[in-house]
Amino acid sequence: MTKAGTGRTIKVSTATASGKGRRGVDFSNDERQLVSTRELREGDMILTVGGGHGFRMLEDTVLLEIKQGAYRAGADRERF
């Protein structure tokens, strides 16, 4: 899981010709406690504004991540 320093929008696409695909996402609070697990499919979108998130690729997947602000190498994410 990673704790993001800035808000992010993540759009889910699929890499399979059939248009099918699945990926799981776990959400945590600022204290690193798991608060929710969801399954995302093609076309789903999530917006993170706090806490952390982690992905599990259940099938071939393409994610488009858009974040607010400049990328700060090494300071942008905290892995846990």
Image (cartoon, rainbow, N blue to C red):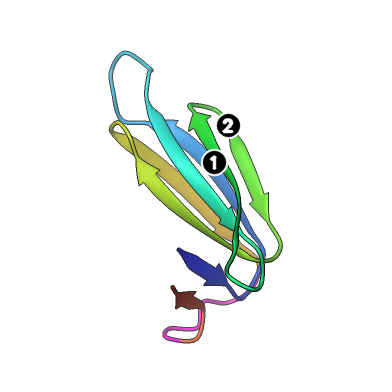
Residue highlighted by disc 2: 44
Is the C-beta separation of discs 2 and 1 under 8 Å?
A: yes
Q: What segment carries the magenta color?
A: 69-74
Q: Secondary structure at mark 1?
A: strand
Q: Tell whether 64 sits left or right of 67.
A: left
* Quadrant in the picture for the N terminus: bottom left
Q: Residue at x 71, y 62 (%)?
A: 49
Q: Secondary structure at mark 2?
A: loop
**Is 30 rendered above or below residue 73?**
above
Q: Residue 56: x and y, percent?
A: 37, 45
**Is 27 rendered above or below residue 69?**
above
Q: Nearer the viewer, residue 34 or 68?
A: 34
What kind of residue is marked 2? Asp
Q: Is residue 59 magenta?
A: no
Q: Nearer the viewer, residue 62 or 78?
A: 78
Q: Tell whether 73 sits left or right of 10.
A: left
* Quadrant in the picture for the C terminus: bottom left
Q: Residue 57: x and y, percent?
A: 34, 41
Q: Nearer the viewer, residue 75 or 33?
A: 33
What kind of residue is marked 1? Lys
Q: Residue at x 48, y 67 (%)?
A: 2
Q: Which one is earlier in the sequence, the residue at label 2 or at label 1?
A: 1
Q: Nearer the viewer, residue 29 or 57?
A: 29
**Is 69 rendered above or below residue 21?**
below
Quadrant for residue 29, please give it.
Answer: bottom right
Q: Residue 18: x and y, percent?
A: 31, 13
